[in-house]
Amino acid sequence: MNTADQYLKAIYLAQRIEDGPASTGTLADILEVSPASVNEMVGKLEDRGLVDHEKYKGASLTEEGLERAHDALQTYCIIERFLANVLEVEEFREEARALESVIDDTVAERLDTIIDRPGECPDCFDPERDYCERLEAGTDGGAD
Amino acid sequence: MSLGQRVSSDHQLTRLLQIGVVLEEVVESRAAHHLDSLPPAERDALDEEVRELLEEAAAESADHRERLEALIDELDADTVSYEEINALVDARYGPPEDTDGVLYDQLANEETAYKFYDDLIEAIEASEGEFAIDRDRLLETLYDIREEEKEGVEEVTEIMERRA
């Protein structure tokens, strides 16, 4: 997943947490980067028509941005579910975060052919807990 | 969250290689399922060329898997067995409608594997860290596998073009 998609996903989650525009501070916390980096990237996403940014309020996804954020979150859910249910990784949230930049969405689609994912994915993703509320860790397989 | 592609630890490298093994197992299992899923009449009529492609793909995936497993073994970790992945593929498998569908799926397999190894190589090259396994040998193994995946993409594309 590329950096832009990681930002779009973070904005989507921050908007759900804050029930409104995503503030720079919240995005910096989620992405573990500086507020200056957030502002720079939000500006780029705004130029590409993916985000609306209002000074002192924060960033909101446009319709196109929302669609991409949804896809990115779905890819992330696949990675988390794959780690938790196929490789039986206990720390699947931390590992998914560390691996998401290296796993492309086409790769995630293949992994998706062997996992069970609810039809409403990614709406059941819990932004506070950082994983799907319907995810039960450790069912089959295991490589640890 | 980790921004930017980089592999920074043995643990992360191991996990990515384990994912590579599962991808190979999925390719191997789906190729076998495609052959079995066709009704006998269609199976008999299946081009020799397509049958050979699927058999070669399954054999090549098994070979890639063994090479990745050798690296993972040196990193002191395990992999998910083929039987377990085969059972997961089996549980959710929906056969393609016809031979063209089989070829599209095979193309997606090869392209996905190529993309995975390409990203993994880039992330390893971007990292300055030391790994518990020899970096040159690791990269050489991955370069070889990536090259074979590229040839696989070309092979499926050629067959598809001939059939069009």
Image (cartoon, coloured by chain):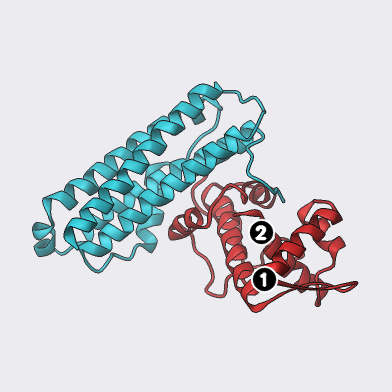
Chain colours: A red, B cyan
Q: Amino acid at mark 2?
A: Ala
Output the chain of dot 1: A
Picture coordinates of residue B105, whole percent (x, y): 32, 58
Picture coordinates of residue B101, whole percent (x, y): 27, 64
Q: Which residue is mark 2?
A: A4
Query: Mark 1 falls on what kind of element?
Result: loop
- Regarding residue B101, the answer to whether it shows in the image is yes
Q: Residue at x 54, y 47 (%)?
A: A87
Mark 2 burial class by Cα count in 10 Å: few <14, some 14-19, many 20+: some
Farthest front residue? A47
Left or right, residue A45 beside residue A103: right
Residue B143 to residue B23: above or below:
above
Q: Residue at x 30, y 38 (%)?
A: B60
Q: Which residue is mark 1?
A: A50
How much space separates mark 1 and mark 2, taking CA atoms? 10 Å
Q: Amino acid at mark 1?
A: Leu
Query: Mark 2 falls on what kind of element?
Result: helix
Which of the 4 image quadrants contains residue B133? top right
Mark 1 burial class by Cα count in 10 Å: few <14, some 14-19, many 20+: many
